[in-house]
Image (cartoon, helix red, strand yellow):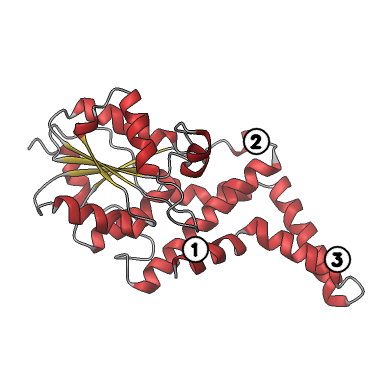
Amino acid sequence: MFTIGKILTIALSPTALLVEALLLGLLFRATRAGRALVWAAAIGFGACLLFPVEQWAVRPLDDRFPQIVDPPAHVNGVIVLGGSIDDVLSQDRGTPIIANAANRLTAFVALSRRYPDAKLIFTGGSGDIKQGVSNEAKWARMALNELGLPPDRVIYEDRSRTTRENATDSYALVHPKPDEVWVLITSASHMPRSVGVFRKIGWNVLPWPVGYVSRERLSAWPLSLGGRLATLDWAAHEWIGLTDYRLRGWTDAWFPGPKSAVLSASTSTK
């Protein structure tokens, strides 16, 4: 199921669908259906170029959980989800290669200094289809050590392949108590699905969103079609993931959002 899910996610991304429509249309261009597919692909690419479609898709995800403006005086632990390091490229080059979600690591280091007594967890094995080739936790250990975090300060969970396994495998390592305050760090657009999974297993985490990819000034959106399609694909990945996780019963809601119990933890002085 993991491999099938990976393949389907790639095949159903907006960019892939547009390319698939174009190729099929060209293949059957002699037919009315083929010509319709070519026109659909052309209109789709044109819309993505002329309008901020990717911003419309990702903005609700980015804004679902607000930033914590008044951090708690004490937390029991800090969890950061993998995804900030390209483990396959790191394996190939023999050094940690930071990916687009680098803010996850920098926020993790900053919070480790803010809360010197808190437990720290990095969770992430490899999301690659072929398992056993690389492991993100291995390279995260090296990168965080270079950033000044001692190896014995962080608990590294290195088997998870998905967001759900990030939650369940980390829970099995530390067995958090119901009254403990744990901060969860991940990209803002990934936070709804992540919080939903953690809540479902009984871990009421305090969301700490980072790595925003949407902007309020739509007039200033980048002109690079490639970069905008990548953002659109990421947003689609999250919306598909939210739907899939809800159908499987892995989240507490289709589009998890802030709860008073979670927000109140941000002003705790425990």
In the rendering, at what x and y percent does residue 3 appear? 49, 65
- Choose the circle earlier in sequence order: 2 or 1: 2
> Which residue occupies 66% across, 59% down?
16
Packing grade of label 1 (10 A; few <14, some 14-19, many >=20) is: some
Q: Are marks 2 and 3 in contact (CB under 8 Å)?
A: no
Q: Name the residue under label 3.
A: 26
- Choose the circle earlier in sequence order: 2 or 3: 3
Relative to 117, residue 84 above or below: below
Q: Name the residue under label 1.
A: 240
The type of residue carrying mark 3 is Leu
- The label on residue 146 is none
The answer to which quarter of the image holds residue 137 is top left
> Which residue occupies 17% across, 30% down?
115
Relative to 93, residue 253 above or below: below
In the rendering, at what x and y percent does residue 57 appear? 55, 53
The type of residue carrying mark 2 is Pro
Relative to 227, residue 47 above or below: below
Q: Which quarter of the figure is the N terminus placed in? A: bottom left
Q: How far apart are marks 2 and 1 (CA)?
A: 25 Å
Relative to 190, residue 19 above or below: below
The type of residue carrying mark 1 is Ile
Packing grade of label 2 (10 A; few <14, some 14-19, many >=20) is: few
Q: Tell us which disc is closer to us: 2 or 3.
A: 3
The answer to whether any part of residue 106 appears in the image is no
Q: Tell us which disc is closer to us: 2 or 1.
A: 1
> Which residue occupies 56% across, 64% down?
7
